[in-house]
Structure formats: structure tokens, C-alpha cells
Image (cartoon, rainbow, N blue to C red):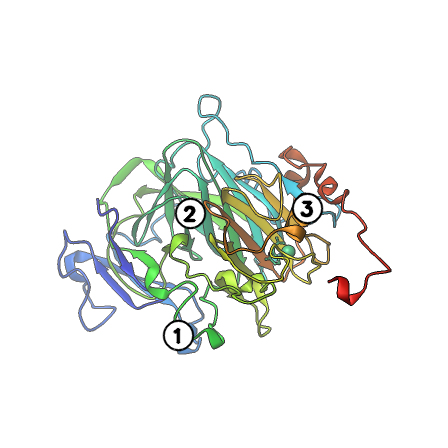
Amino acid sequence: MLLGKYMSGFGNEFASEDPRCPGSLPEGQNNPQVCPYGLYAEQLSGSAFTCPRSTNKRSWLYRILPSVRHKPFTPMSCGDLTENWNEVEPDPNQLRWKPFIIPKSSEKKVDFISGLHTVCGAGDSKSRNGIAIHMYTCNTSMTDKCFQNADGDFLIVPQQGEILITTEFGKMMVEPNEICVIQQGMRFSVDVFGETRGYILEVFGAHFELPDLGPIGANGMANPRDFQTPVAWYEDRTVATGYTVVNKYQGKLFSCQQDFSPFNVVAWHGNYTPYKYNLENFMVINCVAFDHADPSIFTVLTAKSTRPGVAIADFVIFPPRWGVADHTFRPPYYHRNCMSEFMGLIKGHYEAKEGFQPGGASLHSIMTPHGPDVDCFEKNSTAVLKPERVAEGTMAFMFESSFSMAVTKWGLDTCHRLDKSYYKCWEALKNHFNPNWKPSSK
Ligand SMILES: O=C(O)Cc1cc(O)ccc1O
Ligand SMILES: [Fe+2]
């Protein structure tokens, strides 16, 4: 198995052949009358045919049987996966969830698909504009089953347990502190190795891009060379008992049967691929004089809307770094934002908030006030400002969206993880106002 072998680069034109079949990629053309090794050619389009070259995405897959050879799709249970944003009444409160529960395999076998739970979202897969945030909690590998999301791209953030993702393009092992992106329509199957949990940012109608660097220059933030795309791997496996393809389509799940493994792509080429990225490789830019830079400096990937500078969703991380700002309150500022901020914690301790735990989450909705809790404020208002390591051993992240997200019934109620006392972390903030303050007392 070709684990640990990847091709480097973001959005490159890649080409890969399973080494068991040299010459399986057609030379000089995509669609020979007869393909090498008797393979079928299949194009996977990730952008409109007519998109400008800079955003045009497609890959050519050379496979043992084409995807079209399957029995009809029929509806299946969606569990806690939903695109119904009207399940419960809107709630503008600061929300915080304790770590989401992972089912015990001795009690219930749950795989990546049955373990998907939608927390919040907005917009619509039909009009191709929107976002959904899901948790996955599972304990069992998918067997003879793959998933395809016709609705959008999945940015997967493992929090506990590595996941082995077999895709039509090859295999990727993704550990906590790494992320991966499975773009719209790409078939994949997830193997797990114990109790497994993570976060998923789904976007409808846009693909993730590296943010522009502007005055930062040519290097930095997430560097393109650190993105890794799998190499071709195939199995020629007949599954007489039936192989299940699960398709998320217009927010609902459908399944169909076929009698062969979909991971039968012997060779492929193109610029529309799954990829992974290790968050440790993020080159952190930060303030080295005074004040607090906005968290956009920590953007790893962005899914742009059609409005300049406004994202459907940004994936932002808070990595270990130096804090050196002089005469500055260094933690995040008090804040109301025209964007929605969903945060998760992969490991460690987030600076601005006690009680935010790995595997949990928070949502600060549009214009909902939030910021440091009382301890953080008091401590950092008097701290001696030496250079110090911030967030050592920690990795928090934010899905920031221009959509006003609705929380699902599962998120508000049936997950039973909402921390009802969250608001109390700000209750003891004191009034420090001194009307007799003089500039000289600074
Ligand atoms: O709310 C948060 O903790 C995220 C955040 C971090 C930061 O450094 C500045 C603004 C912001 O919203
Ligand atoms: Fe914020």
C-alpha cells in the first residue's frame, strides 16, 4: 500500500499511475479510442466547463469500470445530517458545546457516515451557495461502502484518532493537527482505528483557495508546497454481496449498489484532487510591535463568495507562536462581528477562554458580543509584557462565515452537550471606569 507517498503542491496539474500498471495514463490525449490496459476514461469536473483558466478544475480518471455502472439510488436515513435550517427558532446567544460524545464500539457500531451530525449552517446546496458545519463521531471503519458529496466540498479537521481515507485518487492518512479537503463529488471511504472525532466545514458552490498574500509577499502563511495529494492506487475487487455508494444530494442521503469497488482508478491526471495539509507547516505572521492583528492573518484556506474579500467560509487557525506586542492587551479583543465565528479545539488550551475543551466547540453568531473571559482580562491587563510563547501545544481553529448560521435541533438540543452556563464567564467583568483618571496616571 502506498501510504505516506504524496505529491506536493496546491491546485497543480498532477499525473499519477499505479506502479503496477506502467503506461496506464494515455499519452498525448485524454480520450483514446481504446485506453491502455482496457480502462475506461471518466472526467470529473469540479468547475463549469467554461470557467476561466485560473479557476477551471477537472481530472481524468482511468478506471476498470466507469462509475455509471450502478443500480438506482434510493433514499436512506440521514441520521443527524441535515440541511434544514428551520428546525428550531433562531438563537443569537453565545453557544458553547462540551466535547461531543463518541459512541463506544461495544455499544453501537458507528461509521463515518452514520456518525455525521450537523451542528449549524445556512444557505442551500440547490442554489449552490452556503455552508454547513458537521461533527463526525465514529468507532468503526466503512466496509464496502463509499461516500460522495454532490453538494459541496468537505474540509475535514480530525480532532481524535487518525483517519485513513481511501479515495478514487489514492490513499491519505490524516492525523489530528492535519486537515484534508475532499472536493465535491470525489468518492471516498474512511477507516478508523478507535474512537474517532472531528469537525467538518462543508461549502456549497465554491472551492477552497489559498488566501492572497498582499504585502506579505511571495511566501508565508500556508505554503503551496506543503499541500499533499495522494498517488494513484487501485483495487480490482468484485463485491458479490454488493458495494454501497452513499450520495449526499440536495442535503439528503441516497444509496445505491454496485458489484465492484469504486477505488478502481489505475491512473489519473488533472488539477481537481483531494489533498491534505499539516497545520504545523503554517508559517505564522503576527504583530511584532503593538496591538492585536485581526485573525485573518491566520487564514489557511478560504472559500470565496462572489463579493470581493467576503468569504463563504475561511478556515483560520491559532497556532503556537510568540507574543511580543508592547503596551498591548495581547489576547483577542472584545468583539462583535458581521461574520459568524464557529470555533473548535484540536488540542491544548485556547488563550481567551477557560472551559473551551478539545473536541468541543463554540459559536459566536453575527453581532453577538464575545471576547476574553474575566480571568483572561484581569490577568492580561496587568501581565508583564515579556516575549512569551502563546498557545504552546495548542491548536484552536475557526470556521468564519459571512452566512448567518442556524443551529440544528441536534446542536441546540439532542446532542445534550450545550454548556448552559457559558454566559457566566463574562458576568464578573468589573467596571474599572475612573472618571478622575489623568493622562499622567497612565
Ligand atoms: O473570537 C475569537 O476568539 C476569535 C478571534 C481571535 C482574535 O485574535 C481576534 C478576533 C477574533 O474574533
Ligand atoms: Fe471573535
Mark 3 belongs to which amino acid? Asp
Disc 2 Cβ-to-ligand 1 distance below 8 Å: no
- The mark nearer the N terminus, 1 or 2, is 2
Q: From this viewpoint, which residue is outermost toward the top?
A: 106
Q: Is mark 1 on a helix, strand or loop?
A: loop
Residue 66 point in image, percent of width and height: 30, 54
Front in this rendered view, residue 100 or 432: 432
How far, Cα to Cα, is label 3 from label 1?
Answer: 37 Å
N-terminal of the pair, mark 2 or mark 3, is: 2
Q: Are marks 3 and 1 in contact (CB under 8 Å)?
A: no
Residue 276 placement (x, y as % from top left): 37, 54
Quarter of the rendering containing residue 238: top left
Which quadrant of the figure contains the N terminus?
Answer: top left
- Residue at label 1? 218
Residue 100 on image: x %, y %: 56, 36
Q: Is residue 330 above or below residue 236?
A: below
Query: Mark 3 sits on what residue?
Result: 373
Q: Whole-Å distance between the Cαs marked 2 and 3?
A: 26 Å
Above or below, comparing residue 298 to residue 345 in the picture: below
Pick the front one: 416 or 251: 416
Residue under pointer 2: 177
Q: Are marks 1 and 2 in contact (CB under 8 Å)?
A: no
